[in-house]
Each structure stands twice: as C-alpha cells, then as structure tokens.
Image (cartoon, coloured by chain):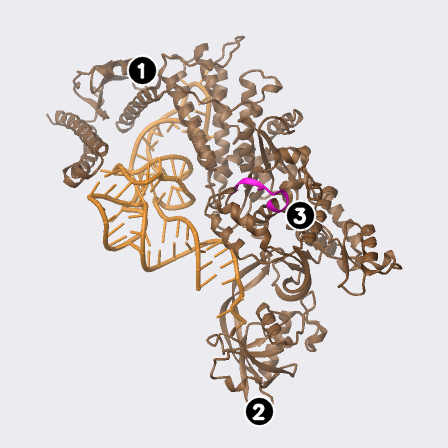
Chain colours: A brown, B orange
Amino acid sequence: PSSTEEKWYSYWEENGYFHSEPDDRESYTVVIPPPNVTGVLHMGHMLNNTIQDVLVRRARMKGYNACWVPGTDHASIATEAKVVQKLRKEGIKKSDLTRDEFLDHAWSWTDEHGGIILQQLKKLGASCDWKRTRFTLEDELYNSVIDCFIELYDRGYIYRGQRMVNWDPAAQTALSDEEVIHKEVQSRLYHVKYPIKGTDEFITIATTRPETILADTAVCVNPKDERYKNLVGKTVIIPVVNREAPIISDDYVDPEFGTGCLKITPAHDQNDYEIGMKHDLEVIDMLNPDGTVAEIAGHYVGSDRFEARKQIVKDLDEQGLLVKVDEIANKVGYSERTDAVIEPRLSLQWFCRMDELSKPALEHVMNDDIRFHPAKFKNSYRHWMENIRDWCISRQLWWGHRIPAWYYGNGDEEYVIARSAEEAFEKAKIESGNHSLAKTDIRQDEDVLDTWFSSWLWPITVFDPDFIRSAEPNSELAYYYPTRDLVTAPEIMFFWVARMIMAGYAFADEKPFSDVYYHGIVRDEKRRKMSKSLGNSPDPIELIEKYGADGTRVGMLFSSPAGNDLLFDENLCEQGRNFSNKIWNAFRFLTMNMDEGESYTPSSEIDPENIADKWMMGRIQSTLKEMEKDFSNYRLNEALKKIYSLVWDDFCDWYIEVCKADQYGENIPKEKLERALGFFEILMKMLHPFMPFITEEIWQRIRDRSAEEALTISPWPEQSDEDFTESVSIFRMVQEQISAIRNIQAEMNLAPKADLDLIIKPKSESAVDAIESASWVYRKLLPVKSFTVDATASKPQASAASVVSGTEIYIPLEGLIDLDKERERIQKEIDRLQGFLKGIEKKLSNEQFVSNAPEEVVDKERRKKADTESSLQKLQDQLEEFSR
RNA sequence: GGGUUUAUAGCUCAGUUGGUUAGAGCGCCACGUUGACAUCGUGGAGGUCGGCAGUUCGAAUCUGCCUAAACCCACCA
C-alpha cells in the first residue's frame, strides 16, 4: 500500500541515503533528463526514471558513490505557451503586458506548478539526491548559460545574421531545424498561368502555396529546357498583384516536376531565397509574425495565410488563370510545440556555428569513448553530425535566458556582448567612441536563448555553475564528471544528447557521460504514442495508487526491451502487483512458522547435506551471474525476468514447498526456517533495484536492523566460488520426475491427495543413492505412501508408468487405472520420441554429417540416440504389458 | 529520395560465435481451496521461426531477392 511506500521513502530520505558527497569511493553519477518545470509526470517519465532508478540503486549497492542529480527545465517555449494560454483565459493578452509583467506571471505559474513532478518522482521511488535539485533558470545556472554564450562568442562560434529560419506563427518565434516535424499530408498542387508581358502568351507554374504569389519576384526555368528557352529574359506579370518580374533560368529547376516552371518567392522558401540571392532578386516579406498577410502584399492584408490561400485561388479561378489543381502528397513542417504550420521566413537571428563543435562529438561516439545502447543509434547520430547546420539559438520569447547583447546605435548593427547592463554600458562607450552615451541609450536584445542552449550544459553546470567562466573545475565537478549513464529516449538524441556531447568536449574537454541508454517510446496497445491529446495515457499516479510503485515499476520494465518501444499494458502492472503479493505471502508464511517467543536469525550457511539448499544456492549464484551480464548490456527487463522467476518459480514454488513441515500444524524447524530467511534476504537484495519498497519492508522485518543496515545501502550479494552444478542437476532431475508424476496424476484423473506407491527405477545403480537421499523431496511434494528406488525393479501389474531421461517411474494403480487411457498416454509419448529419434537417425545416417561435423556434436547425437532408444524400449515394454 | 531497423505461439517478446523435432510471460483449456498466496497451485493445448532461392553435413540463426511494417534524415515547387 502507498502509505508504507511513503513511510520507507521518508525513511531513506531522512537518513540521507540518496545524498552523495565526494569521497574516496568511485563515483557513479547520473543526471536526470530534466522534465519541464511545469509538467506533470507522464508514462514516458515513468519509464525513463524507473530505468534510472534501477541503475542507480544497483550501483549504490555495488559500492559506488552513487549520485543522481534531479532538476527541472524551464522549457522556454513550452512554458511560455502555457502561461500565454492561461493568461488568455483570464482575458489578458501577452501583447498587453510588459516583459517584466509577463515574467512575473510566468514565475508565479512556475512557483505554483514547478516541482510537482519532482514530488511525483518520489512516489515512484526515485532515489535522487534532492539536495542537489537544480532548475535551468535559477540564478547560478542562468549565469552559466550567459557565460557559455559569451565564451562561444569570444571563440567566434556565435554570430548574428539574416537567414531563412523556421517561423512558428503561433508562438511567433524562430525555431531550430530540430523543432520542426515534417509530416506527409495530402496537398493540392495549383497550376497557375502568369501572363507574359507584351504578348498574349502565358507561362504556367505549379505551386502548393499559392498565397506566396503575392511575394513572387521571378519565375524560373531550367536553362536546358527547350520549351521555355525563348522565354528566358522576358517579363511576366505576377497575377493578382500585377507586378512585373523577370523570367530567369537556373539548374535548380527540375523540368520534370509540375510544369517545369518555378515561381520564386525569396522571402518564404529556402531554395527560392538562394536563387534570389544568386540572381539578385527583390525580397518581399509578405507575412506578419502571426502568419497574417502583411501590408506590403497589397492584397488580402490582415487575413491569415490559409484564408488568403483560399481567396487567391478563388480569384485566380475567376480571372481564368487557374489551369488545374492536382492532389499530391507532400511534406509539410509543423512546430514541435504548437503544431502550427511552419513558415520559412527571413529574419535576423543569432546562430551558433557547429562545424568545429561537432568534430570531437562525432569522433568520440564513433570510437565508443561514449557508448550508445543499442549501438544502432550511432548511425543516425553520425548522419546528423556529418550534415549538421548552424544552430538558430535565438527565440522571440521572454521566458528564458536573455541574450546578453546590448545595442547602442540606432539600428541592430552596433552591439556589445556583456554580462550586465553596467558592463555593456562601459563597453558600448568604448566601442562607439561616444562618451556622452547615456545608460538609456543602450538596450538589451529582446530575445531569449533556445532551451537546449541551457540544457546542453546540464551535466557540467549542475556540479559547477562557474566552470565555464573559470575553466577550473571545482571539487564536485572533478569528482562527479564525467557522469556514467545517460538514460533518455532516442527522440531527443539531436536536441539534447548530441549537444551535451558537444558542450562536454567544448568546455570540459571531456565526455559528459560514458554510456547512453536509449529506451523506447511508451505506446498504447494499438501502438499509438501515448499523449495527452489522444487521451490514451493512464495517469501514472493513479497507477501507483492502484498497483503500488513496485508493481508499476515492474509493469513498466517487463515489456521494455532496450531500444524498442514499449507497448504499455496495465495488465503488466497488475502482474507486478501480484508479484508483490506473492513475495508478501511468502514472507507471511515463513513468519507464521516461527515459534512464539523464539528469535530467528537468517542464516547464510547452507546445509551441505540438503540437496534443496545446494540447489537454491546454485540457482542464486547463476542468476547473479546472468544478471550481471544483462546489466552490462542494459537489458534490464531480462534481469528482472530472471530474478522474478528465481523468486516465484524457484524459491516459492519449490524451495518453500520442500521446507514445509511434515505435518500440518507443525512449524518449520528453526534451522530450516533460518536458512530460508537467509535465502530470502539475498533475494530481496537482488530485487531491490526493481522493487525498492517491498524489499526494504521485508528486509527490515526479517530481522531488526539499525538505520545503517537499510537494504537500500546494503552491499550487493557476493558471488560464491563454490560449484553447485552437480547438486543443481540432481535436483533438476528430481523436479522432472515429480513433474512427470504430477502429469500422471492429472491425466489419470487421480485425486490430488490420493496416496501413491512410487517405484523409481534409475538407469543404473549409481543413481540410486542420489534419488534415495532426495526421497524426502518427493514426500514433501507428492502424496507418497511408499517410496522404492530399485535399479532392477520390474513394473507391477496395472500401474501407470513414465520414463524421464532413462529413469522409469511406476505407480501401481490397482483398481484405479483406466487401461485405455494409460495406453493412450504412453502411445503419445512413444510417438513423440519416435519422431525425435527419426530426426537423430537421419542425421547420423548422413555420412557427410558424421565426417564433417565436430566430434562432440556427433557424440552428442549418438548419446541422444542411445538415450532415446532406451526410453522408447521401456515405453514399448510398458505398452506391450497392457496388451497382454 | 537517402538511411536504420523489424518480421518467431492468439498478444508482447527471448533465442549468444549456425548443431533444441524452437523458449518465456500474458491469454486460452482442464483439474484443484480442511491455514502463505484464486492476487494462487498443478497439468495441458498453441509455432513448417514473413515468402522464395542459395551457402552448408546441418539455417529461426549466414547470403541474395521479394513482401509487409516501423522509425530517422533530406530544401524538390
């Protein structure tokens, strides 16, 4: 229940188990991908943070100085959009507010909603070092971002320029290329006739955005296109606006597409812009920042661009200039945040040069200094890095780190870069040579920086916000950096991961992390991405309340193979909760077997005479080994499945069963119970990273612990050198035989409690002792009346029989046996084995196989053949007996 | 248009360097409740490993082609 989970969380927190300070242990550092400050926990966060917590908790138990730094991101555009929306509901327009007024609203919104998500992470059990909580817009980190801008400016990486940028008309800001989502949509391709001046002729162009005709300044054809050769150099009349424009030629135009004539709108298309530059064309910006048609266009002024499109098509049609309309599929860019259609727009923005920054970042991923898990993501990383373009870092927003540029002239040309207005003023005086410059004559750039321009510093500045300025790491940064694992979704590889790597090498001359684990996207059962707008995402907090944090964590991890998407299914959480119950019940059972007033100390010693003990320890040891491998490959779900099965199938279904007292009502003998508790403790450790709450609860209940002995800081179980393989295989054999007997019980419809006279006939005398000494196991798990082990036994009349790897099992069933049924049962098994044998014989009779295959493989087949033949013989004898 | 990846039981996935008449969980079927757990136990039925060809003594595994799907990148109107 969540109340106990809360109790243990506070217990951990109050004892400072999640807090880390540098010491002489090896550090294991993880920085959280900071969620949006005003966000609420969604399923993606759940998965992301569950994975991180598993890694961190395990590292902590393995003796590392584990440090998981939490925090939030100011999320410039997302948060600003939310605040704008909220204000709009209150009847306030952003444009009515001053910058400071708006920021006051934004801060109070942040104060109100910020940090909710961090509280939610606690419910999940995230073992973050909360004393280290950071916020990208807090003073220290704010300053570090400004330092970063200045540093890069000084290095010549940052410049200001007029470029074609992705314009989001809803948020009214420029966006980086990464923030544009291209979606394939059905569009219309409009064929429009442009009259050629001084003739009756027309030239027909094709466009998907007819409204941009208003800003056309040329028509372009391919110079090799014979159809239009004679038109080059002539003048067209742009429809609607009746502006004259030249017909030019350029290789860029594909004669095959559309009509082979391209209208050129330099202000609203990247390619057109380049052609415009080349041919020295006029640039007409026909759009206002909000996507409405600007004054300069002369027509449809003030109407939205899509409204204008409809109108212009209608008008063209009326004027007889619209030739035809084709349906085509093309890609349209949408804003990642607002989902508005992006308009390419020429504007003055700040950019960061990427060529130098990307070099080491590419190299160190390709040579595995930084390992990607799964490694396939290296490919797309390389592709992106090799084709990287300059980063538009300015945003026409208020919520964020304000660009530290101050203008002192009349225009935008003259500016200084400075940390403060004061410093800017001094610099400006010098730069301008104008000593009468007043403080009010300088004004700071209105724009803020892209959110990712702050988060790319996250692994550095959470430890040392002054580092970028000082270039001297403080003791924290020196100890914790580089961090170990970065856990994130592939979606933000370019937004964030790639840029952190660039920043790491650029500023710290060192990678920011050694391993990146990319997990999948959380989808619903129909493979749709979980999102608020689709309403297909469960509320994580409700899940936690319903299934417990432990159950929910298990549910998240169960179906989450590395690098593949997770098809979330609430049933998996239910399965997780059921597992919690199973564990709880197992513990309760052991507790019930304690004698009143007696104290029990879990024992780590196993009984060397007890085959079950040795088997259980062997299973634990091999599971530890396998989990080790799974963790090093970041296959957390595999590791979880293994410990899950160890607890449920091995410990609960077999070990506890054989521990049970002989008589109902009797308690398990003290020694046995203490050994069971000893195993239970080990299992709780192995499970703790996945299910921290219930394991801690049981750990504390198994014996009284001091605070220093909390499970969460206890050492990971040690690997033993002892070899248990023989015991494991003997016990396995016993298990198989018991299963075979249960199968007889079921198929013969025996009452489960009906007493059995078991006769076991091993292949050879040598196995008699092993089985004999395990006879107590059979007695625990089956209703055994008599138990005979005899290598020379013969099958009693009217008995059911089975053969398990050569060992025969007889169960006399005088009067109970249904002979037809038994015959049928045996025949079924014979058929199976005969098919099996046929396959082996086919192989062995193939000379090529015998001569070419490795000897051991051939030997194995021969042994299989012999075993199968002997089993088959025994079964056939049994069958024959019935026929007599 | 380039690139990456996937295709194995009704569903979600394992299957290490080719040598298992292919495994797990869920779901399904049958049986089972006198004290750990029906949030459970026991047993069982489900697959010619997308298709076709090839390499090999031997292919779910390697190669080629085909089909289907997913994702990423890109300025074709």
Q: Amino acid at mark 3?
A: Ser
Q: Are marks 3 and 2 on the same chain?
A: yes
Image vertical order of residue A762 relative to residue A439, above or below:
above
| Front disc: 3 or 2 | 3
Q: Amino acid at mark 2?
A: Thr
Q: Position of residue B68 (x, y in %)?
A: 38, 57
Question: Is A593 a magenta residue?
Answer: no
**Where on the picture, by quarter, is residue A308?**
bottom right
Q: Are marks 1 and 3 in contact (CB under 8 Å)?
A: no
Name the mark on residue A454: 3
Magenta residues, start to end? A505-517
User: Which quadrant holds the C terminus of chain A?
Assistant: top left
Q: Which residue is mark 1?
A: A774
Q: Chain of mark 1?
A: A
Q: Position of residue B50 (x, y in %)?
A: 32, 51
Q: Is residue A824 visible?
A: no
Q: Mark 3 to mark 2: distance in Å?
A: 59 Å
Mark 3 crowd level (few <14, some 14–19, many ≥20, 10 Å Cα): many
Q: Amino acid at mark 1?
A: Ala
Q: Which mark is first along the chain, 3 or 1?
A: 3
- Of residue A540 and residue A225, the one placed in the foreground of this image is A225
Q: Mark 2 to mark 1: distance in Å?
A: 107 Å
| Front disc: 2 or 1 | 2
Name the mark on residue A199: 2
Instruction: Using residue A17 as the reference point, say whether residue A847 is left or right of it.
Output: left
Q: Position of residue A527 (x, y in %)?
A: 47, 50
Q: Are marks 1 and 3 on the same chain?
A: yes
